[in-house]
Amino acid sequence: MPTIMHRENKVSQHGRRTTLQIAMALALLPFGPAALAVSAGQPAPTIGLQTLDGKSVGSRDLKNKWVVLEWTNPGCPFVQKHYQSGNMQATQAAALKAGFTWVQINSTNPSHQDYKLPKDMAAWNSQMNAQLSLATLDPNGATGKAFGAKTTPQMVIINPQGNVVYNGAIDSIRSASQADISRATNYVLKAMSEIKAGKPVSEPETTPYGCSIKY
């Protein structure tokens, strides 16, 4: 018969596994529109970022432009889904062709294991053939927190007047599987198409999904 100590060890191991499973689930927890700090129609918060070569990028640099903000973390399976499939790059290319400025933001804290040095982030973007106007870091998390960004990826579209017109997910199927991309509605492409047609964005807020931003 198993000893009391053996049974206690099994219980302890089970508890550690359960705790790990809960922690992983929380890391991938989606946040609903009610959690969005900046709703569509509101002025965009102040932007303060650093390019990968150390230059400052702020709201003034993006003034009078259509802007797409993309929160990213190369270590996140949901980010990998969209980059390894080419879906994110195709969306970026469509945005650039339509005259939008695409700003990639990595708000990972430098103390976190997922943090990438600027040179490593640049190398990853090159490897992925990312189609960007600007690749930026938000090391103190100020811009991400100002927008209430919760997940990677999370997408925001800002109009030339400086107001948010879309805030939420890249698409409609909340999974890390590339197989779901073709069946999903790409909310960013849809919003940009409506904007170019002179129409209001029909779904200005959706539920962002992915890994939690490592502030």
Image (cartoon, grey):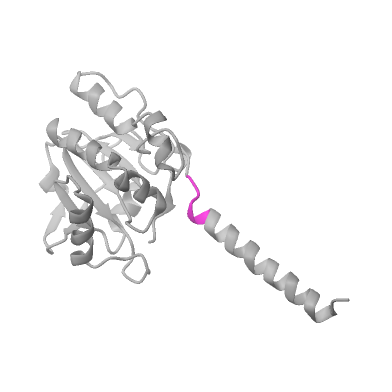
Q: Residue furthest right?
A: 1
Examine the structure image and report whether residue 28 is included in the region drawn in magenta: yes
From the viewer's side, name the closer residue of 176 and 97.
Answer: 176
The residue located at (47%, 38%) in the rendering is 34
From the viewer's side, name the closer residue of 174 and 126.
Answer: 126
- Is 49 rendered above or below residue 101? below
Confirm whether residue 150 shows in the render. Answer: no
From the viewer's side, name the closer residue of 129 and 117.
Answer: 129
- Is 150 rendered above or below residue 169? below
Examine the structure image and report whether residue 143 is included in the region drawn in magenta: no
From the viewer's side, name the closer residue of 164 and 53.
Answer: 53
Confirm whether residue 31 shows in the render. Answer: yes
Q: Which residues are magenta?
A: 26-30
Rendered location of residue 164, percent (x, y) = 28, 36
Rendered location of residue 22, percent (x, y) = 59, 58
The residue located at (31%, 48%) in the rendering is 84
Rendered-image quadrant of the N terminus: bottom right
Question: Looking at the rendering, which quadrant does residue 56 occupy?
Answer: bottom left
The residue located at (14%, 36%) in the rendering is 96
- Is 28 rendered above or below residue 33? below
Rendered-image quadrant of the C terminus: bottom left
Rendered location of residue 167, percent (x, y) = 34, 37
Question: Looking at the rendering, which quadrant does residue 88 occupy?
Answer: top left
Figure disc tally: 0
Magenta span main SS: loop
Question: Looking at the rendering, which quadrant does residue 204 occupy?
Answer: top left
The residue located at (39%, 41%) in the rendering is 178
